[in-house]
Image (cartoon, rainbow, N blue to C red):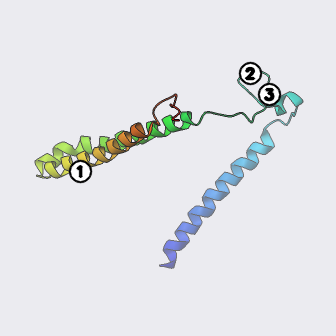
Amino acid sequence: MLFNFANVLVFTALGAGFVGVNLLIGKLLRPNNPQERKLSTYECGEPATGSAWVNFNIRFYVVALIFIVFEVEIAFVFPVATAFRRWVESGQGGFAFIEILVFVAILMLGLVYAWAKGDLEWVKKIES
């Protein structure tokens, strides 16, 4: 029992040691040539202008999050689609199909909710 924990401890120590040795070698080998230009903020090759604290439209994040939700849906549905033929041959095809339908229905319900709430509209209407 203790031998199994010792294996984990040894692998953890070896992994941490490997990372530490590589960082030390990198620090010893890389050149150290600090300059004012190198320490400035890099902004696509252009000189930095203005403050970094600007108001950013939250709708960019909402659209990105909705995209990620449906991208993850595809990542979860794809393995089921690849194994569906085996499930049909073993008699579990109907169950797998209903599971996927429920999964997609829950995600579609979330999409309808976001749509009804107005989160997919770029310019929201102000209600008075």
From the image, tell me which residue sits under label 1: 99
Residue 70 appears at what percent x and percent y? Answer: 39, 39
Which residue is drawn at the image coordinates 47% and 30% (left, top)?
Answer: 121
| 101 displayed left or right of 120 | left
Q: Secondary structure at mark 1?
A: helix
Q: Amino acid at mark 2?
A: Gly
From the image, tell me which residue sits under label 3: 50
| Mark 3 nearby-residue class (10 Å; few <14, some 14–19, many ≥20) | few
State how far apart marks 1 and 3 are (Cα).
52 Å
Is residue 71 visible to the viewer in this orientation of the structure? no
Dot in front, 1 or 3: 3
State how far apart marks 2 and 1 are (Cα).
50 Å
Residue 7 appears at what percent x and percent y? Answer: 53, 68
State how far apart marks 3 and 2 are (Cα).
15 Å
Task: Identify the disc placed on residue 128.
Answer: none
| 110 displayed left or right of 21 | left
Q: Secondary structure at mark 3?
A: loop
**Residue 39: quadrant of the picture:** top right
Label 1 near label 2: C-beta < 8 Å? no
Q: Amino acid at mark 3?
A: Gly
Q: Nearer the viewer, residue 102 or 116?
A: 116
Q: Which sits earlier in the primary sequence, circle 2 or circle 1? A: 2
Which residue is drawn at the image coordinates 52% and 73% (left, top)?
Answer: 5
From the image, tell me which residue sits under label 2: 45
| 69 displayed left or right of 37 | left
Label 2 near label 3: C-beta < 8 Å? no
Residue 79 appears at what percent x and percent y? Answer: 30, 44
Q: Nearer the viewer, residue 113 or 8?
A: 113
